[in-house]
Image: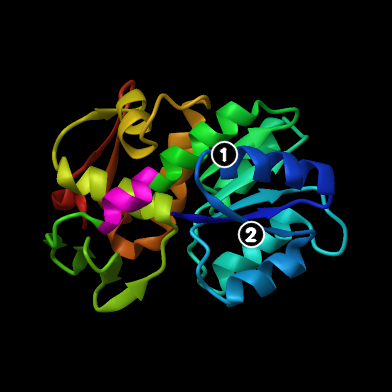
Amino acid sequence: MAKILIVDDEPRIRELITTHLEHAGYTCTQAGDGSAALAALSLGGVDLVILDIMMPFMDGMTCLKEMRRRKITTPVIMLTARAEEYDKLEGLENGADDYVVKPFSPRELVARVKAVLNRTLQRSEAASDSFTFGGLVIDQAGHKVTVDGADVVLTPKEFDLLVFLAANRGLALSRERILQKVWNYDYYGEDRTVDTHVKMLRSHLGRYRDAIVTVWGIGYKFDPDAVK
């Protein structure tokens, strides 16, 4: 069963989450701040992180940025008492896979954990097909992307989004469909979530950023012929 790292400076919150996740069959470990979380992640074996933003010593956003800087691609669900759109978008732009706002429903949190882990499992069980578009190579089995021979580091969500767009080459995909397929459930967020991830994905693809075409009034499509 998947192992989940719960990072929050409030022991009561950590125990509440642990109780519900263990009841759902998961194994849990805990950390009280971002520094302790990074130490736990360095040991490996963590399948998902639930990460609070507001913590002493090292806050959640700093921890998330450091994770991605160290190329730790473990999926992350942000836990925050701040519901402002800026905080949500900042987390997504820095590689978070989802977020839950306090006070939260434990059942909703468990559902989100299941959705993120199911998507990760589906990716690991995917066929060994790869997509090649000129110098852009997307290796599903190896969870690897290269641009003109250079490795591109993507978060799990960015990789899933790229695979979904490439697998539907030439089709205009609405934001709603992308949310349902890439996020694997009826996402509670806004269409801006898709836009944010597309922006981040494009920033990693160099000249192949133009392959992700905006279809005004609808969403996006993948068109490698648009690359100059």
Name the quadrant of the C terminus.
Answer: bottom left
77 drawn magenta: no
Q: How many marks?
A: 2
In the image, what residue occupies the spot 28% across and 53% down?
123
Which is nearer the eye, 17 or 136?
Answer: 17
Q: Is residue 127 left or right of residue 110?
A: left
In the image, what residue occupies the spot 44% across and 44% down?
116
What are the residue bounds of the magenta stretch?
118-124
- x, y (%) of residue 185? 39, 29
Which is nearer the eye, 119 or 149?
Answer: 119
In this rendering, is residue 34 above or below 50?
below
The residue that label 1 is drawn on is 23
Name the quadrant of the N terminus.
Answer: bottom left
Amino acid of disc 2: Leu
In the image, what residue occupies the spot 28% across and 49% down?
122
In this rendering, is residue 51 above or below 20?
below
The residue that label 2 is drawn on is 64
- x, y (%) of residue 36? 74, 68
